[in-house]
Image: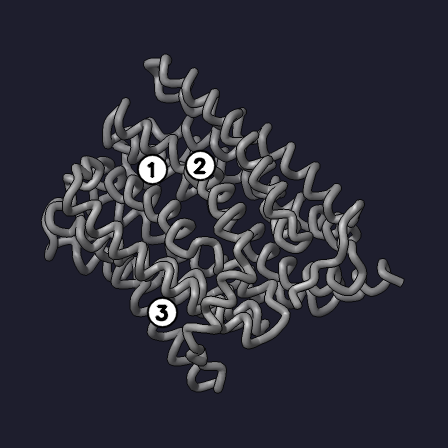
Amino acid sequence: MIDKASNKIFSQKYVRNIRKVFLGTAAAHVITLMALPLLTRLYSVEEFGVLGVYIAFANVGRIVFSLRYDLAIQSSEKESDAFSVFWLGVLASIVFALVAMAIIHFFDASYFVGLGELKYLVPWMILVSTFDGMLGIWINRKKQFKIFAYSRVTRALLIVIFQVFFFKLINGGLGLLVGVFVGEILTVVLVLAILQMKNMRLEFVSFKSIYCAALKHKDNPLFLLPGHSLNIGVAQLPILLVSSIYGKEAAGYIYMAQRIVSVPGQLISNAIFKVFFSEATSIYRATGACYTLAISTLRTAAAPLILLFLAIALGSYFLLDVVLGESWTPAKLVILVYAISEIVPALFHSISAIWFVTNSQRLNLKYQVYRACIVGFALFISTFFEELIYFVLLYAVARAFSYLIFLKKCLHLSKGTGLQPVDNN
């Protein structure tokens, strides 16, 4: 009975929803990739390195700012609870943006030296990015996958337009950074306008409701926040270390490798994750297990992910300098290593929502610590090598191995062994 139900979902509505998110994400990445030949001729490798360092901080900042209450938006059973959690995340993000501004002002923020006065915009850039992410989760909760797809295309197009527009207006190559900021702000405004027109506006709630939501979902900041901060922090650590040890130019190579190699994950894994999270939550809440859906999802994701990663590895190795310019030639091997090693993490990400679906926040933190130790040790050893490629190779192997452990554990959890169905009442 359970297998038939999950197979029916997987073959019909489930796949259609994945297709919507996939097509929108694919179009967004096509826009981004098509713009790279132009952007790499407007901005230098070092300027992309500065953007890469900001992106690294922003990726960690989004996790910290929201206190991971954003993930409770999807899993909340009651609509009123989801509203409360959403505004709780917004409130937490504003507080952290103010704290981050004070830190940048009163303490030495050496990574932001090249930004000049724009360094004070960094917390607000992260705030906007966090809000954009929470809006995306809200849209997925409402199963408005078409709106989400259109928003990703719009965001990519606006960012590219403003990165080109600000090239001459802002000195020091910071147009890349400001373009991201302006593009995300306009995307958020557009999404809010669409929700308003569709009578799905975000209703305000009382501070008492927000306080109750904070208590109800206290495991998110207590366990998911440190676990995910470790996860994302370790993922961003390479570019920060490379920037410090090998310089901004090397950081530019790492950023470009991450940007190109992230395409399969963003294109396929992310699309599947958003729909899997929604469907797996419903199935697990009703039956106490979602193993069949998880296995079907992995089988569907495997072939396109592997083919796409191999295409990126070979295409970048033979065509990178032609497409982006000769200054990017040293990035060839970096992209090759990254592409091959990212297959396992991308497969895991497709079903990583199992941690939340099965309410395994504490266990997730434990495994995040294990992963941080594995990757951290590899990064420590890699700093002793003078060649950038050896640094990248050690990190890539450790990252793939750690995610293989995660994948195995999530499949075990999806069986519901020793667990009770999630109850959000």
State which mark lies toward you, 1 or 2.
Answer: 2
Which circle's residue, 2 or 3, is located before the other in the chain? 3
Q: Which residue shows up at 26% across the image and 50% down it?
A: 100
Residues at marks 1 and 2 touching, judged by CB atoms closer than 8 Å = no
Q: Which residue shows up at 11% across the image and 46% down it?
A: 116
Is 336 displayed left or right of 349 in the figure? left
| Residue 134 drawn above or below residue 106 | below
Q: Which mark is residue 258?
A: none
Q: In this rendering, does residue 19 appear at all?
A: no
Q: In this rendering, does residue 169 appear at all?
A: yes
Q: Which residue shows up at 64% across the image and 63% down it?
A: 278
Q: Which mark is residue 322?
A: 1
Secondary structure at badge 2 equals helix
Location of residue 212 in the rendering, given as x and y in whole percent from the top left corner: 51, 67
Is 118 displayed left or right of 11 in the figure? left
Disc 2/disc 3 C-alpha distance (Å): 26 Å
Give the residue number, with chain letter if any, for mark 3.
188
Between 424 and 161, the one nearer to me in the picture: 424
Location of residue 138 in the rendering, given as x and y in whole percent from the top left corner: 50, 69
Residues at marks 2 and 3 touching, judged by CB atoms closer than 8 Å = no
